[in-house]
Image (cartoon, helix red, strand yellow):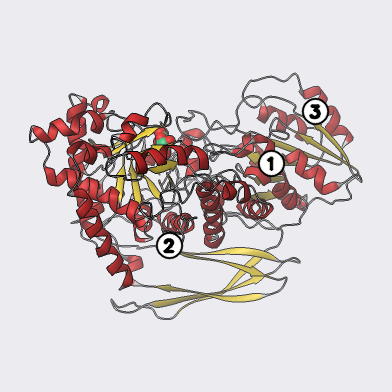
Amino acid sequence: FCSLRAQSLIDRQVDSLLSLMTVDEKVGQLVQYSGAPVQRETLVRQGRIGSFLNVLGANSTREVQRIAVEESRLKIPLIFGFDVIHGYRTTFPIPLATACSWDLDLIEKAERIAATEATAAGVHWTFSPMVDIARDPRWGRIAEGAGEDPYLGSAVAAARVRGFQGPDLKSPTSLLACAKHFAAYGGAEGGRDYNTVDISERTLREIYLPPFKAAVDAGAGSLMCSFNEIAGMPSSANRMLLTDILRGEWKFKGFVVSDWNSIGELLQHGVAADLKEAAILGLKAGVDMDMEADAYHNHLASALQEDRITASQLDEAVRRVLRVKFQLGLFENPYRNCDTDRERRDILTPEHREAARKTAQRSIVLLKNQNNVLPLKKELKTLAIIGPLADDKESPLGPWHAMGKPEDVISVLGGIKAKLGTGTKVLFTRGCEIEKPSMSGFTEALDLARQADVVVVVVGESGQMSGEAESRSNIGLPGSQEDLVRALHGTGKPVVVVLMNGRPLAVQWIAENVPSIVETWFLGVETGNAIADVLFGDYNPSGKLTTSFPRATGQVPIYYNHKNTGRPAVDSVKWTSKYLDLKNSPLYPFGYGLSYTSFSYLNLELSAKTLKPAESLLVSVTVKNTGNRSGEEVVQMYARDEVASVTRPVRELKGFQKISLAPGESKRVQFSLTPEDLTFYDRDMKWT
Ligand code: GLC
């Protein structure tokens, strides 16, 4: 009731303010620019800018906010946005890594810390969570999301929104969330960034939209529309998406910001003849704020005069932006995030680093551990650490690392040395570069390997080979890294491969030949400590993949919730859907990850054989730790609709629970399955 009352009070405040605004002041609320606040002071004073991105710091934001709220006519506060994707200054693992923890509380806490730091530095709003489903690892932005599954992606999206915003938008540490990129940006053909997306409405609604709906239901205050078209209509001009679905069906009350100049790109898409037409298309579709296209700023007022947009269309966009500014408490306290004491006190604290280490440990996925080479013994006499990423302190920050700094990073080499003390002789050499092919360092690498009891080789991608505009046509290990691993394997020494990457990699040879492989993604400031914790058994790895690993680039796209086709692949039968030159299964599937202990599943039971519309059905299973050390297991429930009015995926995730078990301990795990879990769009696109 009180939130309803507060809402209607805010609506009254918004309407009374709106009634005082000139057209230029209204348009001003829909304009966002990046940086250069000093050069833009006049526009701020005129009330013709509503938001900045990339203006950071308690002092810098205070200076320009002062002009807006003390020198403009109506004193409307600015909202400051920034890309806080996986931490502000305390860099956490990339989102694709934290998703592998399957631990929603952990993910929420990580974003709560990111919000605490960002709001201490003047930021009100993050362009995050990125909730794009991605099925093609050639696409560099797969690193920024939660992987290929809508169910897990929805749970993670909601957890991240809760973490950023917290329980009260008016709290000084509440950071407005922005679910992006609406929508289906990850469906780019060929995994080529910004490329055409041509999918059915059924695929759009069943695969790509659910995480956005989850973010909206979790209370996300904003969305960002995407660069791409969907089946002929660019998102920035897509009324079905931004109005019919987002506002009509989902009742979203927040506002939509464009992506960087995505309104201007309607000209390149070929749906707008000029910037004015693009501005009109954007506003009428439901894009409320124009990031850096200069389209709204230059053309909305004249479009109104020419009756090409209506006053109510303009007012509705302004209302949405003002409503969120009121909800954030910016009118009452425009300087809420401009506290230099907080900025000094709340950023990169030991507690935040400790949380980053814990999150990083749980984001690591153990892919292989033959002959139990891992965990390594701390009493090792000589350990060789080899590879171009072993001492790298920049790459572990990964793409979109906000204010993260290399000097804050514990490298793999640093973490292992800190763990081992002086008892073990640690040898190190890079052996080769990340991208530039060269074997000149192999001699030294092999020499060190021969002196060692175990070889840890750290290979993968640089931190800037994934993220935006980082699509790769070949997702094998870059440069001479695989040759380096082959050469080290040839010494006969036990080799542990540590992968550091922002996307699934086609590492079939390594998977078939190297005894131990650990997927560590980009783990942020505590990279080295977390990896050392896992390599030496101080933390038993519990991560599970959220994207399938292909055997080769040519196998892409490959994802677990695929359709059966009329000729499902059988490797031994020619006339089935497969390639001639490799197995049809993924190298590592969605949901996969090993542990230093083992688990068995017993007594799977359903509470009933049928499920009626108003009922729910209990699915129970006993999980037992059959190994000799404690561990965590992610119990996953999948469903399949074997005969329906349309083809259905061979498996769909419908539930998961992460549990801890001591050696020998069993737990009965229960899931409730409801008709809603089994609903889908039938032949007539009816939600059935
Ligand atoms: C970029 C990205 C988007 C980001 C925005 C602001 O082009 O597509 O994810 O939030 O611009 O930096």
Which residue is at 33% across, 79% downward?
Answer: 615
Residue at the disc numbered 2: 168
The answer to which of marks 1 and 2 sits earlier in the sequence is 2
- Badge 1: residue crowd in 10 Å (few <14, some 14–19, many ≥20): many
Q: Could you tell me residue 304's position as x and y percent?
A: 12, 36
Amino acid type of disc 2?
Asp
Residue at the disc numbered 3: 445
Q: Could you tell me residue 106's position as x and y percent?
A: 57, 59
- Badge 2: residue crowd in 10 Å (few <14, some 14–19, many ≥20): few
Q: CA distance from mark 1 to mark 3?
A: 16 Å
Q: CA distance from mark 3 to mark 2?
A: 54 Å
Residue 39 vertical placement versus 416 (above, below): above
Residue 496 vertical placement versus 306 (above, below): below
Q: Which mark is residue 498?
A: 1
Q: Nearer the viewer, residue 514 or 374?
A: 374
In the image, 530: left or right of 676? right
Quarter occupied by the N terminus: bottom left
- Dot 3 falls on a residue whose secondary structure is helix
In the image, 633: left or right of 616? right
Q: Residue furthest left?
A: 307
Amino acid type of disc 1?
Val
The answer to which of marks 3 and 2 sits earlier in the sequence is 2
Which residue is at 80% across, 28% downward?
Answer: 445
CB atoms of marks 3 and 2 within 8 Å: no
- Dot 2 falls on a residue whose secondary structure is loop
Which residue is at 63% across, 38% downward?
Answer: 396
Q: Nearer the viewer, mark 1 or mark 2?
A: 2
Q: Is residue 542 visible?
A: yes
